[in-house]
Image (tube, coloured by chain):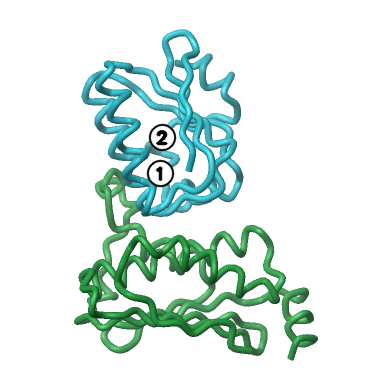
Chain colours: A green, B cyan
Amino acid sequence: MMLIHKKIPSRLDIIPGFLTEFTQKLAPLGLSEEELFNVKLSVEEAVVNAIRHGNRQDPSLFVEVAAEAHNGCLTIKVVDQGEGFDFENVADPTHNHNLAKLSGRGVFLIRKLMDKVDYFDCGRGIKMIKFLKRHSIKRNDKDA
Amino acid sequence: MKISQEKANDTVVCRLEGEININNSPELRKDFEEIIKRNEKKVLVDFSSVTYIDSSGLATLIEMLQRLKKIGGCMRFSNMDQKIKNIFEITKLHKLFDIYETRELALKDF
């Protein structure tokens, strides 16, 4: 079941509005409050990174966000039009010498809050998966 | 996000309400800067009505803690919802900040 597929311009100010729309589209999945919080935060961090670091806030470039629920998994892809990044060498923000740094927590949070995270297309795209619990899947099956 | 301030003895209690996100973090920074300009050294942030925080919100709080420490001040947090507390624990920022269950406990410990 496709939940949302949207192209958004590279503007940070539209993110809260987009996230409200995005979380509303997840309603049929019956996620718990905590699951919804974690998915919302992961999507925000991915979209912010795509706009800020990927597209470098170039208003002529877009970020594509797609979410679908299938076979007990919520899969979300966020793709930018930038140059990609070295996703295998991201500093651990929880190391003592990084703890007080003001940036570098987005990728870490996504990896911790989602069940599976993969990058593709040289880091231009991120695929995040949340395994849906039994109650969510049942409701999903009913809708299908 | 709504920000309200009150004074409890020599401590500024800052009550935040709603989401702390990339759009309103600058507003939060501005309010904290005003507190620091007033030379207030004890700041308690009451999280009881905070529903969401992202990495930009975390960064703003770290920055303000650093600035308060520079002038010999300190900042404490109280009344965090478990979802918010979880973010501080995952990022290990609970090691950087003093987090209390209640406002009273935090005030007592200043």
| Badge 2 density bin: few <14, some 14–19, many ≥20, Cα 10 Å | some
Look at the numbered discs 1 and 2 and tell me whether their residues touch, using CB distance below 8 Å. yes
- The answer to whether A68 appears left or right of A88 in the picture is right
Disc 1: which chain? B
When the figure is inspected, residue B12 is found, relative to residue A138, above or below; the finding is above
Q: Nearer the viewer, residue B75 or A12?
A: A12
The image quadrant where one finds the N terminus of chain A is: bottom right
Q: Residue at x 28, y 75 (%)?
A: A88
- The answer to whether B65 appears left or right of B1 in the picture is left
Which residue is labeled 2 in the image?
B97
Name the mark on residue B93.
Answer: 1
Q: Which element type, helix, strand or loop, lies under badge 2?
A: loop
Give the CA separation, mark 1 to mark 2: 6 Å
When the figure is inspected, residue A37 is found, relative to residue B25, above or below; the finding is below
How many numbered marks, from 0 up? 2
Name the mark on residue A85.
Answer: none
The quadrant in which residue A79 appears is bottom left
Amino acid type, callout 2? Phe
When the figure is inspected, residue B56 is found, relative to residue A100, above or below; the finding is below
